[in-house]
Image: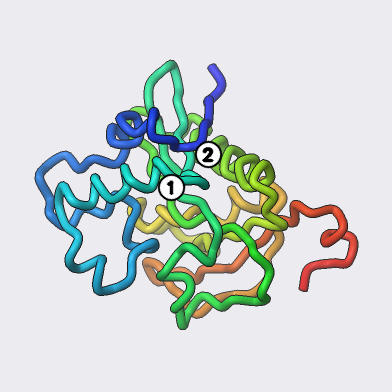
Amino acid sequence: MPVEVHPATADRFEAVATVLRPKSDVAGACWCLSYRLSSGDNNTILGDDRAAYLRGLTERRPAPGVIGYLDGEPAGWCGVGPRADVARLRRSRTIPQVDDRPVWSVFCFVVRPGFRRRGVTRALLDGAVAYARDSAAPAVEGYPVDPEGRRIHQAAAYVGMIGVFEDAGFQRIVKTTSVTDHAPRWLVRLELDPAVSARGTP
């Protein structure tokens, strides 16, 4: 069955929680907030407060991500939104801002055990791109890992793998100084505005 992907609106929060809720009561569980929050807030908003914070984001527009379903079950999550709303990217010293355009960023993938190796990640990326396009974003960026032929730890792949992005039409823009599991990360971009695409990537 195909993976269905939808914006993570408030009515879908329980599905989001099914994917992101930790197996045990971990105060520092991410809930896809480590990129969104300032360092101070990331260290003080903990436990149930993190879930409540994300729930609040699902009540706003744009939604903080997309949720994928396979066989009618919540299967995966992708964090996506305007780069300007992602605090960790705004202040990053290792992932550059290449221009001032209001691009959207894809920065997190989570696929539940039992649903992996079934095309969920690619479907989530396609859904994130579609949501950005519907929200009038001029382009979408990602910051995936390039394993350069080596195996990397599965946990390091939460930002996505370069091959998935390239298969979806993203182009390499610049090699960042960010490293995950000893593997470099690239800033990649997919143009959504035909007028901008015609002029070329900055």
Q: Is residue 95 left or right of residue 194?
A: left
In the image, farthest residue toward the front: 60
Residue 156 vs 69, above or below: the answer is below
Dot 1 falls on a residue whose secondary structure is strand
- Where is residue 94? Give x, y as percent: 48, 79
Is 114 situated above or below 85?
Answer: above
**Identity of the residue drawn at 35% across and 36% down:** 16
- In space, the residues marked 2 and 1 are separated at their CA atoms by 8 Å
Residue 33 located left or right of residue 48:
right
Screen quadrant of the C terminus: bottom right
Q: Which mark is residue 124?
A: 2
Q: Nearer the viewer, residue 109 or 35?
A: 35
At numbered mark 2, what does the secondary structure look like: helix, strand or loop?
helix
Q: Give coordinates of residue 168: x percent, y percent.
A: 67, 46
Q: Amino acid at mark 2?
A: Leu
What residue sits 34% from the left and 29% below the top? 15
Q: Sequence order check: which comes first, mark 2 or mark 1? A: 1
Asked if the residue at tag 1 contacts the one at tag 2, i.e. Cβ–Cβ closer than 8 Å, the answer is yes
Residue 109's label in the rendered image is 1
